Amino acid sequence: MTVNDNGITSTSINGNAIEFQSICKRFGSTLANDKVSFAVKAGEVHAIVGENGAGKTTLMRILYGLHKPDSGTIYVRGKEARIESPKDAIALGIGMVQQHFALIKRFTVAENIILGQEGSKFYISREKGNKLIAELSRSFDLSVDPEARIEELSVGEQQRVELLKVLYRKADIIILDEPTAVLTPQEIESLYATIERMKASGKTIIFITHKLKEVFRVADTITVMRGGRSIATMSVAEVTPQELSELIIGKELRVRGEQRVEPKNTEALVVENLVVLGERGNEVLKGLNLVLKENELLGIAGVEGNGQTELVEALCGLRRAVNGRIMLFGHELTGTPPWLLRSKGIAHIPEDRLSSGMIDEFTVYENLILGYQTEFSRAGLLQKNEIMNETAKLMDEYDIRPRDLEVKMKNLSGGNQQKVVIARELRKNPKVLIANQPTRGLDVGAALFVHNKLLEAKSKGSVLLISSDLDEIMELSDRIAVIYEGRIVGEFDKKDKVEDIGSAMLGGKGEYA
Amino acid sequence: MIDISIIILSTLRRSTPLIFASLGAVYSERSGVVNIGLEGIMLVGAFVSVIASNAFGLLPGILLAVVAGMAVAALHGMATITFKANQIVSGVAINLFGMGITAFIPEALMGMTDIRALNSAPLLAGLTPLVYVAIALIPVSHFLLFHTVLGLRLRSVGENPASADSLGINVSTMRYLGVVLSGALAALGGAYLALEQGGGFTKNMVAGRGFIALAAMIFGNWTPFGALGASLLFGFSDSIQTVIQTMGYTIPSQAIQALPYILTIIVLVVAVKRVRMPEADGKPYLR
C-alpha cells in the first residue's frame, strides 16, 4: 500500500483502483454505455479497446465527470464515488488526457498546467510555477519549456504538457484517450517509456486505443468494449491478437485481397519543382517533385506539418503554386480551379472531413451530391427522385448506417461520415484520388473498409495517400515517398525497413532508437 | 494658431467614454462573449445617471447608472451564457432595448426629449474625475487580466472553455463576470457622456460610440493598453474635427463630422490582419 502526496491511499482492500458497476448512459436514441461493469486494478496499465462508438470515450468521460451516467455506480479505491464534475474527479486523484488535447494554444505551457490550481488566491508568480513544473518534468523525464506557448509546440510536446497537467494535479489514476493517434513512431516510443515510468511510481493507467499492437506492447490487462457493453476483461497473456480482434469486431476479420493490380509505366500525375507559400508567406513547399503512375498507390509519409496539407491543397487547386508545374497525363493543370479539376478526374478526400469534406447540417443525400448538383438537376431544379435513387444505391454499396436517406450528417458516426465522403469522391471513378489521412479517427472495421476502397480506386485509377499512420502507408503503398520540410527526401519500397523511413521522416538525422 | 494643450484636453475628454466602453468590451470578449450591446448599455447608463443624479446627487447617480448597466448586461449574459443564444442577435436586441427605452421614458412619461443634469462634476486640472478613473483602470485591468488567478481563469474560458471546464473552472461564472463588468464599464462611459460632457441626456446621445469602442478594442488587440491607445486615437480625430470646423474652411461640416467614423473603418481594415481575437470569442459553450 502506498500513499501519495494528497494523502490518498493508492490501493484499497480489494486492490481495485476503479470499479464500474452497471454504468448506463444514453444520448438521444443511442445507448452509449449499456450496463458496463469491470474493475481496474491499482498499479496496472489497463487497456480499453473497441471500435469507434463502442462507448470507451463515453465511459472515461463519465469517470472524469464530463458526463453524468443515467444509472450505475463507480467505486474509486473501493469507495462509492459521486463524480459530478472534473473538479470532483481531480479531487479523487483522477486525471485525463483527452484525445483532442484540452490545451489553450495562446497560453504558455506553465499557464496551461497551473490553470485551476494556481497555488495562490490572487497573484500568480511566474517563477514559482516554472520551478514546480521544472521539477515535475525532471522526475518524469518529460522535458518542455514552461515559457513556450502551446501553439509553438509539436503534437508530441503538447501531449507532454497534458501529461504534466495531470501529474501536477497529483493524479494517481491516469486516463489516456487514444494517446498515440497523432504521434510519430519516435514519439510513441517515448510515450511508452513515460507510461512505464508512471506505472513504476505506483500510478494506475487506463489506456484507450484501437491499435492492437499497442495493447500487447504496454498493457497488463485488457477490457474489450463493443456496442456500448463491456464484453470481456482479461490479462494480456491470456489472449492472442487474432482472438482479440475477433472480440473487438464481433466477427472474423476479412482478409484483404492479395491480388493487387501492378502499377503501369504511364505517368498519371507529375509534380515538377512545386513551390507553394504558407499562411505566413513563407515557402512551405520548396521545389517538390513527384511522379504518380497509373494504377499506383503512392504513400506520402512524414511528420505532420512538413508541407503535406499545402501539397494536397495545391493539387486540388485550393492553393496557388508560385512556381512549378502539375501535369495530369501530360496536360498541364497548374492554376486550374477546383471545380474544373474535379471534372478532369481529380478527387479529394480531405484530411479534416468535418471542416472541408462535408456540411454537417445537411442530410446524407445532400452531402452525397455536393459539387455534382448540376448532374442531378434539370432547368435548375434538383431532381429528388434521381438523387434518392443514387443515394440509396451508394448507401447500400458503402454500408452507410443508419440506412436513412434524410438523416443529418452530424448524426452519423465518424466512420459513416467518412464513408459518405468517400462514396461521393469515388462515384465518378476518378483518374487520381488524393486521400489525405483517410482513416484518421476511424475504428478497425471502418479503416479496413476505407483501405479496401483505396485499393479499389487504385485498380481503376491512381491514388496518392497522405497519412501520418506509417503502418497504413506500409501496408497499402506500392511505393513510399517521404516528405520533409517541403521536399520529397527519399523514396522507399514497401520492403524497406520502417526504421529507415522513420529516420528520413526526421530529415535523415536518424534519431530512431 | 491652435493651442496644443486644448487639443490634448479635448482628446482626453472625448476619449474617456470610448476608454470605458472598450475596456468593458475587453473583459467581455476575453471571457468569450461578444457584446455588441455596448451602445445600448451606454445609453441606459447615460439616462439613468442623469435621472438618478438629479434625484440623489452626483455619486449615487453614477453608481446607480453602473448598477443599471450591469443589470442590462446580465440580461445579455442570461441569453447567451445560460440559454446559449446567438451573441450577435442578443446584442442587437440589447441595443434596440437601450435606444427604445431611453427614448420612450422621457417622451411618453415625462413629456420632454432633453433632460438637463442639475449637478455638475468638479474639475481637476481641467478634467472631470471620471477621466482619471478611466485612465487608472487601464493598468489595473492589465494587472488583473494578465497577472492574477482571476484573469487567467477569465481568459481561459474565452480561449478554450472545454479545457477550462476539464480543469474544474466554472465557465458560466467566468463569462457572467466578463459580461457584467463590460456592462458596468459601458454604463460608466454613458454616465460620463451625460454628466461630465453633455450636461444632460438627449435622445440617442451615444451616437455610435459603443460601436467605435468595439472597433477600439479590436484595434487594441483585445488588451487594456491597446484599447486605451485606440480610444485616444479616435478621441483625437474627434477633437481635431471640432478644431477644423472652427477654422472656417469651406468643407461641408457633415464631411468633417464623419471623420471618426471613417477612421474607424480604415483602422479596422488595417487592423484585421494584425490582431488576434480570443479563440472561443462569440461561441456559446456546450459541454
Image (spheres, coloured by chain):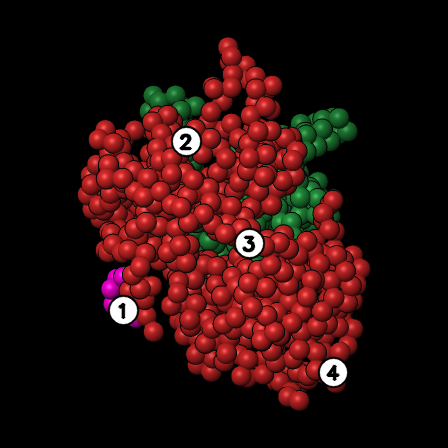
Chain colours: A red, B green
| Residue B243 sits above or below residue B250 on the image | below
Q: Position of residue B97 (x, y in %)?
A: 68, 33
Instruction: Locate residue A489 relative to residue A155 in the image: left or right.
Output: left
Task: Kindly indicate whether the residue at mark 1 contacts the one at mark 4 (C-beta within 8 angstroms).
Answer: no
Instruction: Locate residue A303 relative to residue B35 in the image: left or right.
Output: left
What residue is rendered at 47% in x and 45% in y? A452
Which is nearer the N-term, disc 3 or disc 1?
Answer: 3
Amino acid type of the residue that numbered disc 1 sits on in the rendered structure: Gly
- Are callouts 4 and 1 both on one chain? yes
Q: Which residue is mark 1?
A: A510
User: Can residue A146 be seen here?
Assistant: no
Which is nearer the N-term, disc 2 or disc 4?
Answer: 4
Parent chain of label 4: A
Q: Which residue is mark 3?
A: A253
Q: Which residue is mark 4?
A: A14
Q: Position of residue B194 (x, y in %)?
A: 60, 40
The N terminus of chain A sits in image quarter: bottom right
Q: Nearer the viewer, residue B78 or A289?
A: A289
Residue stretch rendered in magenta on the structure: A503-511
Q: Which residue is mark 2?
A: A429
Q: CA distance from mark 3 to mark 1?
A: 36 Å
Q: CA distance from mark 1 to mark 2?
A: 40 Å
Amino acid type of the residue that numbered disc 2 sits on in the rendered structure: Asn
Which is nearer the N-term, disc 3 or disc 2?
Answer: 3
Parent chain of label 3: A
Parent chain of label 1: A
Q: Residues within 10 Å of mark 3 (few under 14, many from 20)?
A: some
Which is nearer the N-term, disc 3 or disc 4?
Answer: 4
The number of discs equals 4
